[in-house]
Image: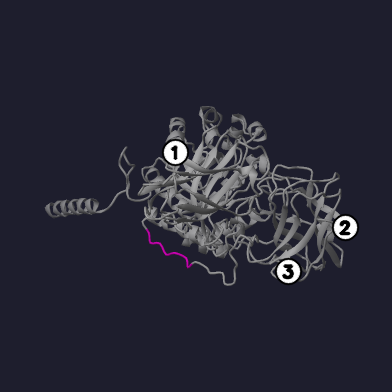
Amino acid sequence: MRRRRCSWSIFLILVALVAALTPTVAAASPGERPDRLPDGAFLTAKNGGNTVAATIREAEARADGYRHIDTPAMIKRLKQLNVTMFTYDIWESPTDWDDLVTELVPAAEAAGIDVMVYLVPPSECFLHEKPHVAGRCSRPFELDFVRWAEEIAKLSLKHPNVKSWAIDDFLSGPVNQALFTNEYLTKIENAQTAINPDLKWYVTLYPGEINDHSMERIKGTVDGVIYVYFVYGSTIDPSQVEVGLDQVLSITEKAGKELVLLGYFGRFLDGIVHPDERYVAEVLRRAKPYLLDGRLRGIMAYGAPLDALTQQPGTDYRAHSGMGSLSFSISNNVPTSPGHFAAASQRVAVDAKAAKKTISFKHTDYQEGGDAGYQLKQLLVDEKVVWSQDFTSDTEEVWHDETVDVTDLLAGKGSADVTFRLYHQQGVTFSPNDTRFDVVTAQGIKITNGGFERPGGWRMSRNATQLHPYIDIYSPARPAKIFNAISKGYAELRGTTHTPLAEPTFPGLVISPANRAMTGNGRLSFTIPRGVDVAPNTCAAAAQTMPVDPDSPRYEIDFWHTDPIGGLHGRYFKQLLIDGVNIWNRDVGDGWPWFYLQGSDHQGPIDITDFVRGKEKVKIEYRLCSGSGAVSGLDVLDYKIDNIRTIGLGLKNGGFEDDTGWTLTGSGPVSVAYAN
């Protein structure tokens, strides 16, 4: 007995020593910050609509006529990204659910990666009896969220790495609010709980939607809220992360709901200037303490570029020369007040011996016409306006040269403050814009970083968070840079190593204001000169007759398009015809004119099976046409198409990198040409 008692005592001492030497992860008390992720916390990447390079699909269609998710490539990238979870959108293709169930979830489980299944609400479900008109939706169960809850719960029992699911844009618009009553949410909750009570459920809410009323709506149902972070539509401003989180947490914590931070790390439709690696790193840095002390359940990298070796769209290049320029931006549907401004300033040395002192620069903006007296581009020296120009007085998307003589103002001074400014003389309600300055040089004054080729050298300021001053530096390898920023940030949060991807190079790529291709150097360009009169129903066209694969089970066309006109309706129309039948007719006044949109009115490829099946060949024709009335005095129009792909058709030169494959015809002032 004595020997056994002694052995037991020794055992207890050893246990105590092991416990003392073993690190533990406990819930952090207020003000305490653990050094690694708390249990249950997650770091996820999300694909999603309207993004570029967020999903990797197979290059060729399978036997069913669809391009499926490339699961091995996706898993490889997710591991390199250091995620603990992948948020999988069921939206882009009718095959997404099957790909998830049969391929991605098992592969993710083997790789140690959890999965959140992500669905869209009624406002993002575009159902139609005609396939070429129908758009994306969460298929196959569409808007039956009780059925979705049951099926996802069943999947989670078979594969325990399926930890949660979520609904996008939960209360955005009356149709979503009408469906998602507390009564209906309770039915969904009961359905999933009956199968797997441990499965978690989240809803995505925008800042203004997170309030006591919405918490009452979801009471007793969902586990948490996905909080979408942006600042008045901007995805380049990380300064309000803490303010936003604190405000939202004051509501969600009181309601007993978990909180997940969604950061736009890929493009956002209302974001005029797209995120870069600096923004991504800073958002993650600011969110880190909230995640580590348990106030955040997870971080979601929206639009994380898993297809990281893709080129950043050429239209994101907005410098005059070099890679960088100074940007003052305001996003969609953002109101301002008189006197609001954004500015970039620099304290400069003045050469007292110089007989003449001047400041030269280049400037452009993305607005022409409209009402004068609202938005002004300005140059100030020692807080005195020495140059001011209304947005409406120059040509949009064209660089203009200015030289301002400041000799008298700087007489006797050894230094001065030089400031470029966007100034709102009157407030606006809807005036999305991106004002640029570049190539700042001077005589008798020493300017630092006048080409804006690096982030420093200028002090950014503003008196309203609606306006965003930023040094924007383009890189064709931006997807890889953002990927590496996420990977590094996630590695630090997990306490693991970070191995960056080698950034791709793009030999032969022309980077200049003249190259407006989405990728590469070529695009199809429909143009109308500024200020000309155009008769009704005047068109230009690019056509190609393509052979049809008789064995293809379905037929599809996919393309990307953009034009600079927004909000001006009924004048010109973008069209797609198959054998003379107009199957796609889109007003050039459509939204988001500052970057390429994909395919159909609802984003994505267009199913053209009904117009192709049974034929040996078809004529595909893209057109730009004036409407039924004459058009006069409008701004220049440059409608661009790039990266056409098909399924079941013998397409040639879909990237327009040379002058072959298409027959181009124009009439009157409406013309079409290869731009490469």
Q: Earlier in the sequence, mark 2 or mark 3?
A: 2
Magenta: main secondary structure equals: loop
Distance from Cα at disc 2 to Cα at disc 1: 54 Å
Which region of the structure is painted magenta? 496-502
Q: Horizontal and vertical percent for residue 300? A: 50, 48
Query: Looking at numbered disc 1 in the image, what kind of residue is underneath it?
Result: Leu
Can residue 500 be found in the magenta stretch? yes
Q: Circle 1 sits in a helix, a strand or a loop, which is it?
A: helix
Q: Residue at x 61, y 57 (%)?
A: 315
Q: Which mark is residue 245?
A: 1
Distance from Cα at disc 2 to Cα at disc 3: 21 Å
**What residue is disc 3 on?**
653
Q: Earlier in the sequence, mark 2 or mark 1?
A: 1
Q: Circle 2 sits in a helix, a strand or a loop, which is it?
A: loop
Mark 3 and mark 2 in contact (Cβ < 8 Å)? no
Query: Looking at numbered disc 2 in the image, what kind of residue is underneath it?
Result: Gly
Q: Horizontal and vertical percent for residue 183? A: 61, 29
